[in-house]
Image (cartoon, helix red, strand yellow):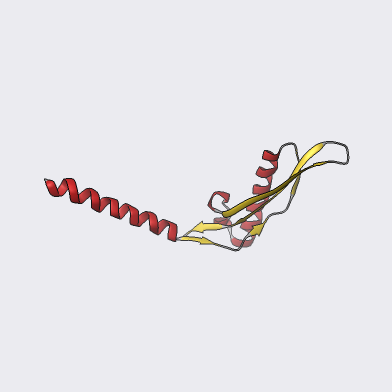
């Protein structure tokens, strides 16, 4: 009875920690990719969403769809600024940059 209560939980914990480390080790990343700048968005938040969308499309074209997931990317950043359009409307432009990564 003591074996089951002490050794089995410790062994299971060790196995789970090894699997978690193996999953992290299987992550493969590419060189950083800067997406095209998106313009004309009413808020910074919508400009960032648009920037991620075009970043993903560029990464999928360059490295396949496996690498196009923004959530898996590393070193993520945005370069955003507010500007006034030619018709006098305030708008946002953003560019997303990140290292595309995929799990093997």
Rendered location of residue 69, percent (x, y): 56, 51
Q: Is residue 75 above or below residue 93?
A: below
| 82 displayed left or right of 17 | right
Residue 53 image offset from top left, x and y in percent: 65, 48
What is the quadrant of residue 44 in the picture? top right
Residue that lies at the very extreme toward the left in this rendered image: 1
Instruction: Kindly identify the residue that appears in the image at 14 percent across and 49 percent down.
Output: 3
Q: In the rendered view of the protein, which quadrant contains the N terminus?
A: top left
Residue 18: quadrant of the picture: bottom left
- Outermost residue to the bottom: 31
Residue positioned 68% across, 48% down in the render: 51
Q: Above or below — where is 6 with respect to 43?
A: below
Q: How many tags in the picture? A: 0
Q: In x, y percent, where is residue 30? A: 57, 63
Residue at 88 percent of width and 41 percent of height: 86
Quarter of the image where one finds residue 75:
bottom right
């Amino acid at each position: 009875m003591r074996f089951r209560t002490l050794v089995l939980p410790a062994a299971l914990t060790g196995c789970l920690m090894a699997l978690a480390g193996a999953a992290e080790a299987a992550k493969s990343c590419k060189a950083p990719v800067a997406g095209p700048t998106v313009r004309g968005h009413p808020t910074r938040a919508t400009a960032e969403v648009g920037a991620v969308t075009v970043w993903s499309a560029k990464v999928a074209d360059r490295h396949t769809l496996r690498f196009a997931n923004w959530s898996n990317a590393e070193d993520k950043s945005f370069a955003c600024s507010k500007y006034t359009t030619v018709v006098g409307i305030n708008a946002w432009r953003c560019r997303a940059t990140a290292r595309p990564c995929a799990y093997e």
